[in-house]
Image: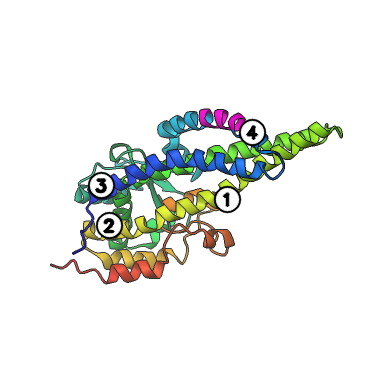
Amino acid sequence: MKKIKTVYDHIRSNNIKTTLLILLFPMIFIGLIFLFTLFVAPTQTAIETCIAVAIPTFIICGIWMLISWAFGDAMMLNIAGAHEVTADNREHREIYRTVENVALASGLPTPRVYIIDDDSMNAFATGRTPRDASVALTRGIIKRLDKLELEGVIAHEMAHIGNRDIRLDMMIITGIGVTVFIADIMWRFMYTSHHHRDNDRDQVNIAAVILMVWLALCVFNWVVTPLLHMAISRNREYSADATGAHITRNPDALASALRKITTDSRVESLDRIHSMAAICIANPSNPRAFFSNLMSTHPPVDQRIARLESMNLKS
C-alpha cells in the first residue's frame, strides 16, 4: 500500500530541495560557463575563466541569499504593487477576517494580508516561515469569487505556507535575480568595450570568452532555471489544492474558483516577471506568451479540477 504523504513529509521534502537548489544553482552555472568557454578557448583558459567567475559569483550569491532571506518577501510584494490591509481597515475588514478564519482552520498563524490593485483574478503567498508569511489577493479575485470560492483560494495559499513552499520559491526567485543582474552587467560591459576595442588579437580572444560567459548566463536564466523551477512546482500545486480542500472540506468550491480564475488570471505588474509565475495560484503572464506556456510551472487546470472533483471529504 502506498504511503500517504503528510504535511511533515512535504516540509522535509522542501527543506531538502532548498538545500539542493542552493548547491546546484552555482554548480550548474559554473559548468555551463566551462562548456561554453571551450568553444572559443583551450581547456586551461576555460578552467581559469571558471575560477575567475566562480569566486565573485559565490560571493554575490551568498550576499544575495542573505538579502533575499531578509527582504525577499517584501521585494516580491513590492514588484506586485501590493499594499497591506489590517482588521482595522473598514473596506477590507471582511477579507481580513476570512483569511484569519482559514488560517485558524489550518492551524497556522494569521498571515499578513495584501491587496493587489488589479481587476484580474490571482493570488500568492510569500515569506520565510508561517510566522512571517503574507497572502496577496488581487482586487478582482475578491470581487468576482463568492465567499466559499475565495475561502478555497486562501486555503490553497495557506497550504503553500504550511508546506514551506513559500521559502523555497523565495530562494529560487531571488536566486534567478542574481544571474539576471550579472548577465545585464556583462552585456553592458561588452557593449561599452565594443566601441573602444582595437583589433588586437588578445583583445578579440578576451571578448570571445566574455561573450561565451554571457551566453552561458542566458542559457542558465532562460532554459535551465525555468526547467528546474517547473519540475519542482508542478506537483506542489496538486498538493496545495488537496491540502486546501481538506482545510475547507469543500473541494468543489476550489475547483469552481480555478475555473473562474483561469479565464482572467493575467496580472499586469507580474506579466514580465516570469520567475514569479510559480508562486501564483494560476499563471499571471499573458496566456498567449509562448514562453509562459512552454515553461509553465502549473499543471493543466483541467487536471487540477478533475482531481478536486474526485475528492470525497463528506465522511
Mark 2, residue position: 244
The answer to which quarter of the image holds residue 36 is: top right
Q: For residue 119, which numbered disc appears in the image?
A: none
Q: Viewer-proximal residue, 196 or 205?
A: 205
Q: Residue at x 27, y 62 (%)?
A: 148
Q: Position of residue 245 (x, y in %)?
A: 25, 61
Farthest front residue?
Answer: 43
Q: Which residue is mark 4?
A: 49
Q: Amino acid at mark 2?
A: Gly
Q: Mark 3 or mark 4: which is in front?
A: 4
Considering depth in this image, is 301 or 234 the residue closer to the camera? 234
Which residue matches tag 1?
222
Q: Nearer the viewer, mark 4 or mark 1?
A: 4
Give the mark nearest the N terminus, 2 or 1. 1
Q: Which residues are magenta?
A: 51-59
- Residue 162 visible somewhere in the drawing: no
For residue 21, side relative to residue 31 (left or right): left
**245 or 184: which is nearer to us?**
184
